Amino acid sequence: MTAGPEEVPCLLMRGGTSKGAYFLADDLPADPAARDDLLLRVMGSPDERQIDGLGGAHPLTSKVAVVSPSRDPRADVDYLFLQVALDKPEVMGRQNCGNILAGVGPFAVERGLVVAGEERTSVRIRMVNTGDLATATFPTPGGGVDYTGDAEISGVPGTAAPVLIEFPPGAGKLLPTGNIRDVIDGVPVTCVDNGMPTVLIAAASLDVTGYESPRDLEEDAALAGRLRTIRSAAGALMGLGDVSDATVPKLTLLAPPRHGGAVTTRTFIPVRCHTAIGVLGAAGVAAGLRLDGGVGAEIATLDDAGDLVRIEHPTGFLDIESSLDTTADGLPSARRTAVVRTARKIFDGTVFPRSAGTAPIPPRPRGGRR
């Protein structure tokens, strides 16, 4: 008898400005290597088009959330974020994703991990990748998730129900290098970690304006080389070790705002330039702008009357509430970080992975004969 095809329950969801496949941990292999092999086949990697899987041929649409009940008394569910590479057989789990995080609460209700309230539901989430916590609150009229609403976020067409994500005061170091400003390869930088290791750089210090399109920045070979050097050195300074095969730290170029916000950004994730900005990356930027002496302080336009920071990005803006405190030893720390995102269920059903042992042929190097 021939075995039938593999079948895995899956919910495909847009979370913020990303899209990913959401799974219950119990529906995936417990062994990480077997799990990663399955996810590569589900998403259609390695293949830049991901033509034989769920992936959307871009890092922002090749993401996975693995959710399970949490044993941590501070959380209702555990959320493991996994980034599935496009062009190589690799699944990475060294970072969080705040956009995919926006769908975790609704998914937990959809799968019965959390009982919905009659009007609104708050789900406490532990982000397994780093151990950080967040609370997502969203509408559940009548005890079911309602994805419709009038909240609008840049980079996503239409409107949807708001998902308020709040992060408790950071337990880690906001300044992982211990300095408000470091100099790498002759370039001043500010390294912050407010949920995502992020390096802030004035665009002008790299001989770009910071207003270029993501494609133009990606095609700048000289810029790519400088960013690679800075990222490698920053990773070591931030205690991340060798980051050549990691997706963190993110690098964000800063320029003065053009549309009434606090700052204009271009973020590398880590090689492709983000068409928007990640939630946790934005949390780092917002906190970094408030640091006296940081590279963002002389670029940003901040409203001293409130906590709201509007961060401009290639497809619009992201509003984030950010305030700082001071620790007992006099170091800056994050006091409050909150952001409104949206999420939408796209389909809920069964995914059929590509058969094991049928990985696609790696693409030929660009520029060679076809």
Image (spheres, rainbow, N blue to C red):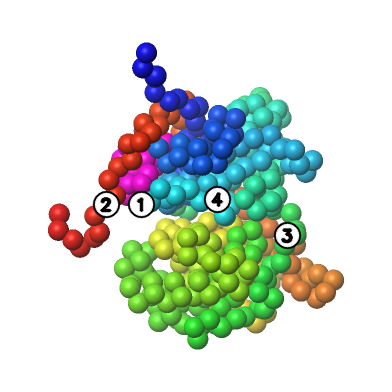
Q: Which amino acid does label 1 sit on?
A: Asp
Residue placed under numbered mark 2 in the picture: 363
Answer with mark 1 or mark 3, whichever residue precedes in sequence. Answer: 1
List x then y, in percent, for residue 84.
Answer: 45, 47
Check if mark 3's residue and mark 4's residue have beta carbons within 8 Å: no
Check if mark 1's residue and mark 3's residue have beta carbons within 8 Å: no
Question: Which one is in front, 335 or 68?
Answer: 68
Judged from this view, the residue extending furthest toward the left is: 369
Query: Residue at image x 60%, y 65%?
Result: 240
Number of numbered tags placed on the structure image: 4
Q: Is residue 130 left or right of residue 83?
A: right
Query: Residue at image x 38%, y 33%?
Result: 356
User: Alpha carbon of mark 3 to alpha carbon of mark 2: how far?
Assistant: 42 Å
Q: In which quarter of the image is the C terminus?
A: bottom left
Q: In which quarter of the image is residue 116?
A: top right
Residue placed under numbered mark 1 in the picture: 87
Residue placed under numbered mark 3 in the picture: 170
Q: What residue type is labelled 2?
A: Pro
Q: In this view, does 370 lie to the left or right of 236?
A: left
- Magenta-drawn segment: 42-56
Residue placed under numbered mark 4 in the picture: 93
Check if mark 1's residue and mark 2's residue have beta carbons within 8 Å: yes
User: Alpha carbon of mark 1 to alpha carbon of mark 3: how far?
Assistant: 34 Å
Q: Is mark 1 on a helix, strand or loop?
A: loop
Residue 44 within the segment the image draws in magenta: yes
Q: Which amino acid does label 3 sit on?
A: Gly
Q: Nearer the viewer, mark 3 or mark 2?
A: 2
Please indicate, yes or no, whether residue 151 appears anywhere in the rendered image.
no
Answer with mark 3 or mark 2, whichever residue precedes in sequence. Answer: 3
User: Alpha carbon of mark 3 to alpha carbon of mark 4: how far?
Assistant: 20 Å
Answer with mark 4 or mark 2, whichever residue precedes in sequence. Answer: 4
